Image (tube, coloured by chain):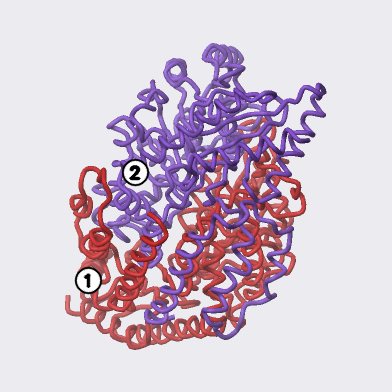
Chain colours: A red, B purple
Amino acid sequence: MNPEEFRAAAHQLVDWIADYRTRVPELPVQARVKPGEVAAQLPAAPPAAPEGFDAVLGDLDRVVVPGITQVQHPRYFGWFPSNATLSSVLGDIAASGLGALGITWQSAPALTEVEEVVVEWLRELTGLPASWRGSIQDTASSACHLALLAARERTTDYSGTRGGLQAEQAPLTVYTTEHAHSSISKAVALAGFGMDNLRLVETDPWTRAMSPKALAEAVAADVAAGKRPTAVMAGLGTTGTTAMDPLAEITRIAAEHRMWVHVDAAMAGSALLLPEMRWMIDGVEGVDSLSWNPHKWMGTVIDCALLYVADPDHLVRVMSSNPSYLRSTVDGEVTQYKDWGIPLGRRFRALKLWFQLRLDGVEAIQDRLRRDLDNARWLAEQVEAAPGWRLLAPVALQTVCMRYEPAGITDGDALDAHTLAWVDEVNASGATLITPSLLDGRWSVRVSIGAERTERSDVAAVWEVLRTAAERR
Amino acid sequence: MNPEEFRAAAHQLVDWIADYRTRVPELPVQARVKPGEVAAQLPAAPPAAPEGFDAVLGDLDRVVVPGITQVQHPRYFGWFPSNATLSSVLGDIAASGLGALGITWQSAPALTEVEEVVVEWLRELTGLPASWRGSIQDTASSACHLALLAARERTTDYSGTRGGLQAEQAPLTVYTTEHAHSSISKAVALAGFGMDNLRLVETDPWTRAMSPKALAEAVAADVAAGKRPTAVMAGLGTTGTTAMDPLAEITRIAAEHRMWVHVDAAMAGSALLLPEMRWMIDGVEGVDSLSWNPHKWMGTVIDCALLYVADPDHLVRVMSSNPSYLRSTVDGEVTQYKDWGIPLGRRFRALKLWFQLRLDGVEAIQDRLRRDLDNARWLAEQVEAAPGWRLLAPVALQTVCMRYEPAGITDGDALDAHTLAWVDEVNASGATLITPSLLDGRWSVRVSIGAERTERSDVAAVWEVLRTAAERR
């Protein structure tokens, strides 16, 4: 396809995108296709000769749009806000169009340096320590994995360069809570620690925050048993209830044992753009690494996660490689992001952050986040005031956890069945999407507020939908 | 930014992309900026209020374009072809515009099912076994890492669910060659094997292919020493010289010891789209996993790597997670790609493959690959016929390795200095980009043919540039 053919097709496509975004509010929130239904609409092989662009564009309407859950919908309250602001989309389009190759600084200096600048902008804007340095990764899952690898290698004095983890005698242990994201336990298994060496530290029954006392006891018990405490994976805004593990106390305990402290702030990190929310990171100066996803609440189109480290040398020692065909005369003077993660080749992801921050401006992003915090507080008040409804966790951010507990249902299993039934009914209706979640062993409902276009009127309308569905059963 | 503001800006942006792609041939191939020069052009903080789109668009010309090496240039012969065909760019634009969220099948069924279909199309088109299943990953580096994790867990009977690699007694060993990509040794360190347990198996001095006899001997020696041979990381088209490790013999040896065989065909995999190149994968039916990057020679805009596995159950057993908030009633009926890799959240990467294959058609892609193979053979003939020039490796694909060895220079170090000097001069001129590379301990030159717009006339012109620069020194 030559540039003129591209020009013609791309004008059609961006009109299609603008039209699609305009009509998202009219679509059912949850995709209604059955397993296999999308695949069945596609041919068994691609064409030998080119198809026209109209056929391909038509398939976006025919096959793709009905086949996705509309996370850009103003009444999407599912897993977490997954905003893809159109300002960031423009940056992503520029990245694709440029087709730059990020393997070393030399292959695309601007790809590296714009990334360095925008992650520094965001470090400053989120109040993280001035000495920290950041990089863009695909997801917080990968960032947690990298943090655990760095922790493992620091504790073993870089065993990877020798006999590996398998040559280590005293077992390495990792600490988190049951409320941590599933990527933490996955990373513990993948990094070779093994699930037997993951400790789920006790949490406060209401805030679900890690108990520092329980952490200290668990670490002491492991030390007494000849194990090596290696890392604490703290959560800031856990997935279930946005619990906040207390960083100041955790880092104090970790420092005594030279443990790595990683903070997973995947969704909650966006809140740090608000100065009044910085209480969340009290104690962060003792942390080794922190990751959060602009591709969630802040609204940079997926995928865009930030990984900040207090000392990038730990990453580079673990992950650098320097084959002859990647060497250049500027090595040593520049940042080589290939040594900060697993992939060698990188997209120009910094452009979508750069475009979003410039085209929207910081204040508009802050205003939107404050709107969402207000909406969550408002919804929590409604839940607390409504007969039969119970708020199940503090509303620290934009997530409201609730359950309708009718007086007539006293059996826990029956209550679970009731909850799942009305949630399923609501989601199947297409009016909204909310996520059922297990909390203290029982099904509850998470209403995760923060889609870019969600206004108070949407929250109020959906609250009525939930009440109606739950209370009439 | 609302859809109408997006519409206006996006029309400007796609015109800018079409214009940029048109003028790429006029730009210097290698970026000329100095370290820090790009960063110095950006302000210390993002704006509080929105900037106009013209300012941002202007910075693409002012800051970004001079700051990237033009890998889409017809005279780019550097690291590897990194084509970003405009047909695939359209698919990537659609993905960004949709802003779909891939975490489970339920969050975007079409994101999963279009991926299943296009990787199946490409499996069939590349002649891989019909029972294999594939997924899209970011890079071959990640794919190699995942393969090593699966191998490690299979050999240890899934130690990750118990005491981890650190609880294993007999050391696990991995086999590759010195010509393997740097991501292999990196993965060996990251997956906890440790560099002491990586064996660089002897290769043929001309083809640089792994010696099966040497592999068998290395494995036997490790078994005798009480170690557990776990994986062979074979290369198909190694980075340096496109060497082809012999899969039939490697898989025979691996089968005796139940070793995992992964094939890294990052760049070379595109050649499998040509039926006449299928000799490369003779023996592939004994392989456990194979990865290649459509984002290289085939031309899907970065990032897009394919990882095929003979039995996905090994990946899923190692990488599945199932927190309550991700469960749905269709679990078990659908593919959950979150369990095939490290990241939970996924972009809709399948769209760029879908668009490229449909808008270009398979035959045009095949024609382009054949053109490049012809061009490489032609260049190799010129090198062999030119006095003082030496072809340093067989030209199995599109990479030609060469050195100019003037009669007057007999000292190896002096020859290295001569080679690096003329290559540096050529690259600094902006006329082309070629990659110096160490081969058998001496600097040589790789001319990697395969940019989308490289025609015979470009290869011929650059060959004249190389001759002139090397021979006049």
Which residue is depicted at the point 41% across and 42% down? B306
Which residue lies at the image location 73% right of the left edge and 25% below the top edge? B405
Q: Where does the image place residue B305, in percent across and percent down from the top left?
A: 44, 44
Report which residue position mark 2 lands on: B364
* Amino acid type indicated by mark 1: Trp
Q: Closest to the observer: B137 or A44?
A: A44
Position of residue A174 relative to residue B456, above or below, is below
Quadrant assignment, res A31 = bottom left
Badge 1 local density, few (<14 within 10 Å), some, or many (20+)?
many
Residue A161, image x and y in percent?
69, 35
User: Observer-nearest residue: B92 or A175?
Assistant: B92
Classify residue B40 by image quadrant. bottom right
Tell me the CA gap for discs 2 and 1. 53 Å
Which quarter of the rendered picture does the C terminus of chain B lie within? top right
Q: Tell me: residue A31, above or below residue A369.
A: above
Residue A413: percent from left, percent from top: 25, 62
User: How many discs appear?
Assistant: 2
Instruction: Look at mark 1 in the image and give the residue it sits on.
Output: A422
Give left or right: position of A68 versus A233: left
Q: Chain of mark 1?
A: A
Residue at 46% of width from left, 26% of height from top? Answer: B261
**Element under disc 2:** helix
